[in-house]
Amino acid sequence: MEFFSRLGFRVSLLVAVLLYFVSATAQEAVQQDTANVYKQDHVYKQGVTPMGLDCYYMAAYYYNNEVVYNLRGYPMCYTFGNVVSIKVNPSGTSYAVLSKKKSGKSRVRVYDLWEADYELHSFGKVEQPTAICYTTDAKNLVIANMNEIQFYDARTFKFVKKFPATFAATEMRVSPNIYFLAVAGENKVQVWNLETGKVRTELAMGAKVNALSFSADNKLMAVATADGKVYIYDTQSFALSKNYEGMGEALSCDFHPNGKYFAVVESKENVRVINLLDKEEGLNVLSPAGGISQAVFVNSSDDKSFLVHNTTGNITYSHMAVLSPHYRKMLAEELDKCMNEWLKQMPGESFEDYELRVTDENRKEQMRLFEQEISTRLAEGQVEMSDVSLGKYNPENNMLTVNFNNMPSIFLTVPSNEVNDFMDADNLEFRNAKYGLTEDDNFELIYADVYNTVSGKSYVYNNLNRAPLEFLTADDNFVPLELVQQSNMEEMQLQKIKQSVMESAKSENVISDHTSINVSSKVVADVDADGNKIMNYVVDVSYEVQMGFSIEEDFGPGRFKVEESGAAMSMLRIIKQAFEGDLAQYVKEGRKWKVKVTGMADALPIARKIPYDGCYGEYRNEPVYKGKELSNITLTKEDGITKNEQLAMLRALGVSNYVNNNINGISKMNADYEYYIEISEEKGGEYRRINLEMIFIDAL
């Protein structure tokens, strides 16, 4: 600090160069370091005590008084007064700083994340800002002041819209699906519907609100208050789902990415990690040195989870290896895939046979069968890993209790004259075991042939008809059969269109039998931002070209224009013909639809710059998903193409450009485009492909 004051400017040229280097390598350093901390915490020592923090992917950034630092402990910027809050742009391009002078005047400035003290913009005209946040898609920066909540474009900093404010916000969060903006101030929380610009609900709390958090699946919102209470709300109705008391000061809170766990900073010395499904499980992350004020969960590239928190003189990454997977979530995702396939009309199956096979009753029974199959696979032989013991015997009903140390006990029917054969649990073999999941996300044995090696007799334990988990019977998860049947009929039409387009393309020598195109459709139950149940229509289209034929039928090395790929153009002609014909009812002016385009590239290095003529526009720091993480990409005519990820992005842009400009009515819809890029570790044209998913919101 003295250095800055003495020289009269914030960072000298030499320091700026150094900071640029360390800033750009901080995230890489975290990834390297955390590879060695899966068995213990990793502590990043700092020259000052972090007072608050935010993360981009695995890299933490923090502040102390008037300075923002990176994980290496180097100053990122010297601010206007003491820092109140920092928020890192979710795409990793910049960070916003809310600071306040002793006079009480506050200001918001935005800085480049990868270059030291490089101010991108100052919101000098915003009067007395009190809280900041980014929308989770990185498109908007939200600033609250005493009278209104203002939205700005996160890249151009141009004003977008505003909401009136009835109180001074101290904390704001946007839900991952961009449905809600939660605003907290003093002892109340206001939740805005971002689509309608209206207040969805207002919650009166018993004490000052310290923190807000949304779960990654958008289903829950948490509010932590200064009287040591945490309230969990269901975001469909905003009814109270759970509440926890005795949480100390409840300084900060955050949901684990898998949605099963929740962290609360109880005090400067302790973070409590709570299992939201099983109240018996949890852990404390202790710091005798104190200094904790914030704790956030982050995931590494190999899906290891860490709890990042500030302590006195440190930033600490606590590895959460002890936390168990969210089995119910894994079950639900796998079950959904299995049921989507089962609900399709099979090749050669008549519609009459399909109607007999797929009924509401059969669907529920099939879900139970899939549930048993998936749960058993997830359980990975729990009984073999258990310490088995024998409990009491009830002679009135001939029930023998068999205990497990990792599952609930079972009750085995054993005639009284055979009880003496059960003297040692080690003599029991559990064959053909099947497992289920309990409400608290633990495994239970639901079927087994129990063989007694002493007597040579077998006993059947059968609890297959136990009460199913609530999501197996909830009406919200079911799509009416008439809509499933409609979707199947439309998928058959898609298949016919695909066959016709491919035959035409082959006759024109555009593609050959070495190119295959996949099309599918389904109806998915969802909930809108007002909590109403809706039905979305989803169409997936993708293609593959066999090894050795991509140059002729798909993209050659360094090629990206969609017109240069026979396979891509054939795929797009299927979409055009379908939505200008049999599926035209889904294309309506103003209807909301979400388009997920995935562009792919192989690992062939780009030896020299590839010219780009700007045919798909120019982009700077455009938000794009790289794998699971939101990142950014820049594409300009001046810089050209030097990275494979730019080729992948341009292939994706070519698809959206074609769809928007060549299919009647599409350009008048309310579109939300999301871009994903995938870079293969292998070389070869078969890795230069495109996938397209179109979700027509509330279409049925």
Image: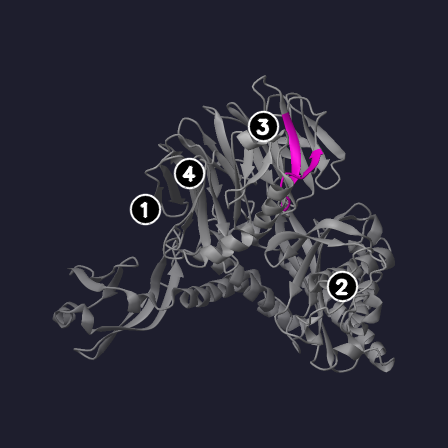
Kindly report which numbered mark, 2 or 4, lies closer to the viewer in this rendering. Answer: 4
Prevalent SS, magenta region: strand
Lateral position of residue 633 relative to residue 64, left or right: right
Real-space Cα separation, disc 3 to disc 4, in angstroms: 23 Å
Q: Which mark is residue 442?
A: none
Give the numbered dot on residue 280.
1
Identify the residue under disc 2: 651
Q: CA distance from mark 2 to mark 3?
A: 50 Å
- Magenta range is 107-121
Tell me where residue 10 sits by quadrant. Answer: top right
Does residue 657 appear in the picture of this structure? yes
- Helix, strand or loop for disc 4: loop
Mark 2 and mark 1 lie on one chain; the one further toward the N terminus is 1
Q: CA distance from mark 2 to mark 1?
A: 50 Å
Question: Identity of the amino acid at label 1?
Answer: Glu
Distance from Cα at disc 4 to Cα at disc 1:
33 Å
